[in-house]
Image (tube, grey):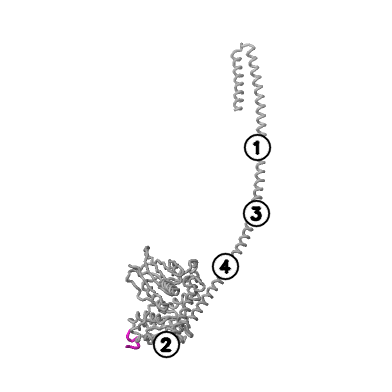
Amino acid sequence: MVSCKKVLLDYGLLIILLLTLARVLLNPHGGGMMYGLVIVSCGLTVAVFYVQRGANTAALARALGLEHVAHDLAQSNVTIAKELAEANVIFAEKLAQSNVEIAEDLKSKYEARQDVADRGRQSAEIAALIAEKANKAKSDFLANMSHEIRTPMNAIIGLSNILLGTRLDTKQKEYVTVLQTSADGLMVLINDLLDIDKIESEVIELEQAPFNMTSLLERVISVMSVRAEEKGIGLNVHYEAGLYKTFIGDSGRIRQIVLNLVGNAVKFTDRGTVTVFLANGGKGNGKKDLTVSVTDTGIGIPEDKITEIFGKFIQADSSITRRYGGTGLGLAISKSLAEQMGGYITVTSKEGVGSTFVLHLSLPVGASESSKPAYQENIVYLDKHENAAQLPILLVEDYEPNVLVATTILKNFGYRYETARNGQEAVDTFSPGKYSLILLDVEMPIMDGHATARHIRNAEHIRGSWRVPIIAMTAHAQKGDREKCMASGMDDYIPKPFNPHQLQAMLIKHIAKDIPKMGAEQILVKK
């Protein structure tokens, strides 16, 4: 804006000067005044020129000064920028070095922690390995003890059962009865200890098969009725009207629970009755609720002890063990089994009046009311099989007392039999079609039962002959023993000790099933 004003001023004065000169030239007679005006204009023009020139010089000087300042400032900025860049590089290097040192320190600490963690894992692995070895040692010990105890117990229980079937005077029968009762009590203790170990190890496997609930209860009542009669108490069973009977579940474990509850009721009742009542509840999701209540008029349970009776090795009173016996494991096992099946057990009791235990279950229902298993294990078979004399059986057993027990039972039921003292002898004796059934011990010298079964199956395969039923008759009764027997080619499994009725039931189960498959040439002796 200032420059524009200066230009206008300069040009304005020049125009005035030119106009003045032109006027003088056009009017030479204007007089002295006009010349004076020209002179003044020229003076002003010259003055303005010099003033303007000075201003321009000063402006130029200032411009040159500012250029130098700008150049110096730019140079200074370049210098500062270089210095800042160098400082940033140095700072970045130091920061990077510091980060490297921090990272190395963190890495060192991480490695130290990782080393501690690795040592911890190693310690945990070592501890787990030790625990696994301890559990295996414990399982092996229990398996061995089970086998070593069951083998002689089979002879004791078997011979006492056989003796009770002979002619005995009153005193002899009393002695044998005490022997049998004591042996049965010892087996209950052994089975309880093995069961609680299985439950704690979570190795109980539940079967799912159709069964008839009323038949199950009737078998329990049949087993316990002898004891109830001996004590002079009543043992009754009642069913709800319109009862649904067929369910799917583990009938063996349910029977174990009910047998324990009824057994306790009979044991703790000295007079009066024990009543078992089966009732159905609601239905939903393909399942039906059912309850089995066991009511007695026995000694009852103190109110402050009711919550404790399901504990392991717990009795309501220490004197109960001395008076009534027992391990204090039965209810603990029953409670655990019921819970594994999705049920539970409740109890109400009054000391001196009696108790009621109720098993609550919810089980899938069977296909129809008429559906029943083709075979019910543990049914008491007292009759001789109609074809017993036609059915040669091979008994393979190395323990002489058990040979005596088994052969006596077979003889009493009218079966023909042959014996072999070890697996090799059985293999040498066997030929396809010679026997209708084989009772095979598992633990034997020279050749055990598993190898024996494999040899027999191989011989049948080579000949293409009929498959003879092989029943494992063994004191091995731990988890997986049955499966091992099946895997080696056996057809069924009866653990020792067994009573005559259990053996007869097993024989009838397989002989009745396989008789139609046998040709006439496979029966050695005919009626």
228 magenta-colored: no
Q: Residue at x 65, y 41 (%)?
A: 77
Q: Give the mark nearer the N terminus: 4 vs 3.
A: 3
Depth check: give the residue in front, 499 or 18: 499
Q: Give the mark nearer the N terminus: 1 vs 4.
A: 1
Q: Nearer the viewer, mark 3 or mark 2?
A: 2
Separation (CA) of disc 1 from disc 3: 40 Å
Depth check: give the residue in front, 382 or 166: 166
Q: Residue at x 50, y 71 (%)?
A: 317
Question: Number of marks in the image?
Answer: 4
Which residue in the protein does label 1 denote? 70
Of the residues shown, which amino acid type is indicated by label 4? Ala
Q: Give the mark nearer the N terminus: 3 vs 2.
A: 3
Q: Give the mark nearer the N terminus: 1 vs 3.
A: 1
Crowding around mark 1 (Cα neighbors within 10 Å: few <14, some 14 to 19, many 20+) is: few
Of the residues shown, which amino acid type is indicated by label 1? Ala
Q: Which disc, if any, is residue 124?
A: 4
Separation (CA) of disc 3 from disc 2: 103 Å
Which residue in the protein does label 2 denote? 169
Crowding around mark 2 (Cα neighbors within 10 Å: few <14, some 14 to 19, many 20+) is: few
Crowding around mark 3 (Cα neighbors within 10 Å: few <14, some 14 to 19, many 20+) is: few
Which residue in the protein does label 3 denote? 98
How far across and how far down the image is residue 287, in percent? Answer: 38, 65
Separation (CA) of disc 4 from disc 3: 38 Å
Whether label 1 touches label 2, CB < 8 Å: no
Image vertical order of residue 27 relative to residue 178, above or below: above
Q: Can I make out residue 336 in this image?
A: no
| Main SS category, magenta section | loop
For the magenta stretch, what is the residue range?
519-527
How far across and how far down the image is residue 507, in percent? Answer: 38, 81
